[in-house]
Amino acid sequence: FEMAYIFDNTVDNEYSSFLRTIELVQNRMTKSVGISEGDRGRGYGGFEHSVERLKTLGLKEGAPIIKFDVSGNVNTGTEAQKLAEYAQSVSGDIAVIAPPFHIVRAFMTTITAFKRNNIPVRAYAVPGIPLSWREEAAHSQGLLGKKRAGLLYDELQRLEKYQAPEFGSMLSAQEVIEYFNWRDG
């Protein structure tokens, strides 16, 4: 991959994405790592925290870490938009990394932003390392606290809600299939 982009998550869930990212870097499967910086008021530790955690968990030199300044509220939509802006300047594939319960929405939001901005870069969903589905965790900027299985249910509801024009017009399932056909064709 040209880049492995880590979608931000709460401290409860970041371990999943960080371990997957370390795996990609150590196996030389990515040239760089992307991490956002923005408002940290809702459960997200920030860029420096993420870099430090990656190093603590075993990330060694091998891929530069690129900061994405979201300049405000860090959420799936703002991150996908910043990633689309970055993707305008590269030609390689991008890995989108998020915990398993969040990967579908993170990926669909990314390809929605790519399509809106006419970005011809191919994106791939790379789920983080699975964490216990029965464990309580905070999500959605720290606003939700449930077992991860319940968070998955909430994510599926958001996928439906965010397809409405008033909530961002995320791609439909059919449009995602069309994207796969383009990407893999």
Image: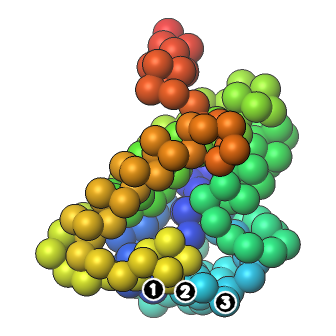
Q: Which residue is mark 3?
A: 41
Badge 1 vs badge 3, beta-carbon distance below 8 Å: no
Mark earlier in primary sequence (2, 1) = 1
User: Label for residue 11?
Assistant: 1
Task: Please name the residue shown 80% across and 75% down the image.
Answer: 72
Q: Position of residue 33 (x, y in %)?
A: 61, 61
Q: Quadrant of residue 141?
A: bottom right
Q: Quadrant of residue 36?
A: bottom right
Task: Please name the residue shown 52% across and 51% down the image.
Answer: 106
Badge 2 vs badge 1, beta-carbon distance below 8 Å: yes
Q: Amino acid at mark 2?
A: Gly
Q: Nearer the viewer, mark 2 or mark 1?
A: 2
- In the rendered structure, the answer to whether residue 60 lies left or right of residue 157 reads right
Task: Please name the residue shown 51% across and 28% down the image.
Answer: 172
Query: Which class describes the residues within 10 Å of circle 3: few (<14), some (14-19), or many (20+)?
Result: few
Kind of element beneath mark 2: loop
Q: Is residue 21 visible?
A: yes
Q: Nearer the viewer, residue 89 or 39?
A: 39
Query: How far apart are the alpha carbons under marks 1 and 3?
Result: 12 Å
What count of labels does the image hold? 3
Q: Position of residue 158 (x, y in %)?
A: 47, 52
Q: Nearer the viewer, residue 142 or 166?
A: 166
Identify the image quadrant of the N terminus: top right
- In the rendered structure, the answer to whether residue 64 lies left or right of residue 16 reads right
Q: Amino acid at mark 3?
A: Gly
Q: Nearer the viewer, residue 132 or 89?
A: 132
153 w.r.t. 181: above or below = below
Query: How far apart are the alpha carbons under marks 2 and 1?
Result: 7 Å
Kind of element beneath mark 1: helix
Q: Which residue is mark 2?
A: 43
72 w.r.t. 175: above or below = below
